[in-house]
Image (spheres, rainbow, N blue to C red):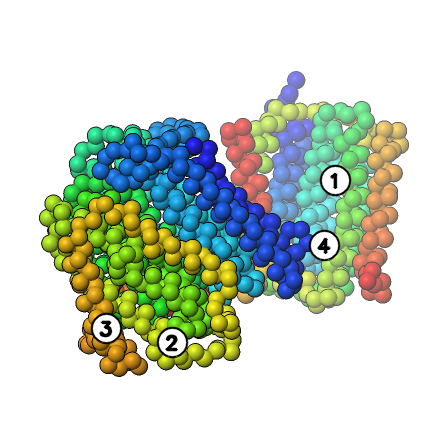
Amino acid sequence: MHVVYPAVVAALLFSIGVYGVLARRNTILVLMSVELMLNAVNLNLVTFDVWLRDQLHGGQVLTLFVIVIAAAEVGIGLAIVLAVFRNRQSIDLDRLRDLFEPPNSSDPDGSQPAATKVTTGVGPE
Amino acid sequence: MIVAAALIVLLPFAAAVAGLLGSRWPGGVSRTEENNLRANRRAAWFAVSAAVAALALTLWLAWQTSGSGGSGDLFWAEFLPGSAEGTLTVIGTGAIPISVGLQVNGLSVLTAILVTVVALAVQVYSVGYLRGDSRFPSYSAFISLFTSAMLLVVFAADLLVLYVGWEIMGLCSYLLIGHWWEDRANSRAAVKAFLVTRLGDVAFLFGIFTLGFAAGSFRIDDIIAANLPTGTLILATMLLLGGVAGKSAQVPLHTWLPDAMAGPTPISALIHAATMVAAGIFIVARLFPLFPQPTLDVLGVLAAIGMLGAALAAFAQDDLKRILAYSTISQLAYMAAALAAGSPNAAIFHLTSHGAFKALLFLCAGAVIHHVGSNLLSHMGGLRRAMPITFWTMTIGFAALMGLPPTSGFFSKDAVVLAIEHSTSPIRLLLYGSALITVGVTGAYAIRAWLRTFFGEEHVQALAEPAPGTAHVFDGREAPRTMVWPISLLAIPALLFGFIGVADMDWPSAAISLLVALLGAGIVYTAWRSAPHADPARLLGPFRAPCEQAFYLDRAYAALIARPILSLARGVVRTDTHVVDGAVRGSARLTIGLSSFAKLAQNGNAQLYVTGLLAGVLLIAVGAVMWG
Amino acid sequence: MTPALWPPTAQEIVFLLLSVVAVGSALLVVTTRQLVHAALWLVACFGALAGCYLVLTAEFVAWVQVLIYVGAVVVLMLFGIMLTRAPIGRTADLDSGNRVVAALVALATAAVLVTVVIDGFRSAYTPLDPGTGSAKSLGGSIFRTWVLPFEALSILLLAALIGAIVISRTDIKGRE
């Protein structure tokens, strides 16, 4: 088995996952895309474990760990999604804009021009 | 000898420090009535004892330098031929060194005697005049500091050391004019005096630099000995003349002096009549060999204008102190005229006698003001019987001012007129004519002030509460003893000092000026006899208003200098607000405007952020692969 | 000795077919207009991947993949879709406005990764020996060498469990 085949497949899967994370609006779909990326990594791990003939099976064991962590992540992620849905009635990513800085909170001049106070100091003497 | 000179300078300085720091210390810091009295008493002791010590040392110095072996055409060199010089240290500056040193010679000893005598008189007088003033300790300390500075000017051997004293005098003048600063007018007068003299002092400093760099030394003797080119001398002395005009209140920088009368009367006597204003004349006399003819001619023209104009202004004033102030300007112009005529001899002679009799006049005026509670002539009258001692001493002062024999003014003024008469200066006729007319006008205004103060009906009304700027109303018949004593003391030199010049008298010329003075006095007397209630100033007719306003010079300065500078300052402020600040604020706005483009990326969409992040990572990866 | 890249061996052909299924269904996951279909395509993708693992002799990993991913994760996803009352059927707005940029970034990522991978592993080859990824050998190495990370992971899993419960329950308030 040439290592190139699974490696290229993993790369393609990862890129698809990237696209899904960046392009999907629904948060659950984004989570699915993250799973795709994780699976691409898993494929790589298994491939290189086989190729390097690791006696400790580090690659495959790590794959198992990743699967476990992915399960945990999905659990937590879905809980968060549910909480967001409960609060906002929506899980559309582009409607969750709390990171946005409202435009009127910044005051461009800082304060009134201080110079007016100076001019009053030099009255007609 | 030089140690004595140093002590003369340093003792009043030590008294100033002690008076400022030690009057209330320890335990008297809180301003209760009792503490004030104790502090005043202690400050008075500091000041008076230092003044006495300085006077004693100066007299000892005079005795040391005296002798008959003197020669030369300067009269002080005749009486006080001795001299000494000492240098404490030489400060290397990289270019021309500054030698911190003192010099004792006849001129400085003579002037120092004047300074210490008047200072002592004023210190003693102030004890009575400012009784109960809560700021008396600082007041007397400033007088001590002033005395020290003036003595430093007198004894300095180096022009820069002299300048230090010169500036401290200006500072003390400012502080003391503004003693009653609660009144806005007083502090304005102080600022005016400070600024006007400062204008002259800048020129003076540059004159010192010109001389010092041309001669390669700041020592006065070196500069006089150096053979400097005439062009440099003219430039330098013209600059020095600026400082002289500022300090000695000569035209065109004289306007501060009448306003400076806002200060306490002893200050007017000490600083603005007898000593500080004489410093300008003293400097010219000290550096007289350096002054070329063109500079002296300029000085002469200024003096000729100043003496007559100030005398006329004095004739029209109603404020006793302002009369004396204008009279001071006029008399200082006499000294300047003597210098312009080429006779520092006559100038210093008149300076000394004038210092004595003008201090006397001011102190007497202070006593009168103290008694009446007002500065104005129209509030006085008939004080002859109420204040006999003041009357007689002030009569001596006025006689000296008019130049009546046998007072000192008669001899010294005659010396000045004589010097002008014998001068070879091209403006001799102008000076002579001006001087003679001024003698007449001086007689007129002196007799006017005398008559209106001491004769006629009494209309003293005690003021309920004295305004700041005037002294307390005193209910006794005569001024307190501490005020009478200095007056009496000063009357002696005012009366007798002139006799040291009796040998050089030119009687016909003296007779002419005496006649002129009596003529002026006589006209005023007849006018007063015919109408004792009216002000003899009405003789001026249509010129009365311009004379009273000192020929509108203050207004002209305000219009020509003060207002343009104020509007320029306002323009600067406006430029600062709108251009400089505008640039700053504009750049801030520009940045904010530009950043709003960058803010477009910050739209809160987390996906966009991640996109940017990944694109960046990708670029880095590509970079690492391609060039790694 | 390394055989040539072309023609592929039988194992490679099977692997390539499975991977075509995996990549294709993954593409459908990120492009489909129906939310539930996306979850189902995910099942297909994970299943094909499990087949790939089998071909690569990692049989234990393949079963775990089927059990956990296909069995648990996708079911969780379906629950999530259901609980958030997502629309069933075709919806036009599953993609955000970021699509074009996302496609660009994804394509660039793919180009960079594929280029680098091909460049790096052009000649790498490994013969496949069956049995190396059996439950026995993997279990041995987990419980001998990797036992400590394994235990740590179990705690992590527990923590995630509790966290998920706390987050999703409404009657547990935060500390005031």
User: Mark 4 and 2 residues: CB-CB less than 8 Å, in contact?
Assistant: no
Q: Amino acid at mark 2?
A: Gly
User: Mark 1 and 2 residues: CB-CB less than 8 Å, in contact?
Assistant: no
Q: Is residue B160 above or below residue B191?
A: above
Q: Which of pointers 4 and 1 lies earlier in the amino acid sequence? A: 4
**For residue B382, which numbered disc appears in the image?**
2
Foreground of the two, A100 or B112: B112
- Tell me, yes or no, whether dots 4 and 2 are on the same chain: no
Q: Amino acid at mark 3?
A: Val
Using the rendered view, name the quadrant where residue B55 is placed: top left
- Tell me, yes or no, whether dots 4 and 1 are on the same chain: yes
Q: Nearer the viewer, mark 3 or mark 4?
A: 3
- Tell me, yes or no, whether dots 1 and 2 are on the same chain: no
Q: Identify residue for label 4.
A: C40
Using the rendered view, name the quadrant where residue B528 is placed: bottom left
| Residue A116 visible in this rendered orientation of the protein | no
Check disc 2 and report its element: helix, strand or loop.
loop
User: What residue is rendered at 21% in x and 65% in y?
Assistant: B518
Q: Which of pointers 3 and 2 lies earlier in the amino acid sequence? A: 2
Separation of residues labelled 3 and 2 (CA atoms): 17 Å
User: What residue is rendered at 40% in x and 34% in y?
Assistant: B64
The location of residue B370, given as percent across then percent down, is 46, 68
Q: Identify residue for label 3.
A: B524
Instruction: Give the quadrant of the C terminus of chain C.
Output: bottom right
- Tell me, yes or no, whether dots 1 and 3 are on the same chain: no
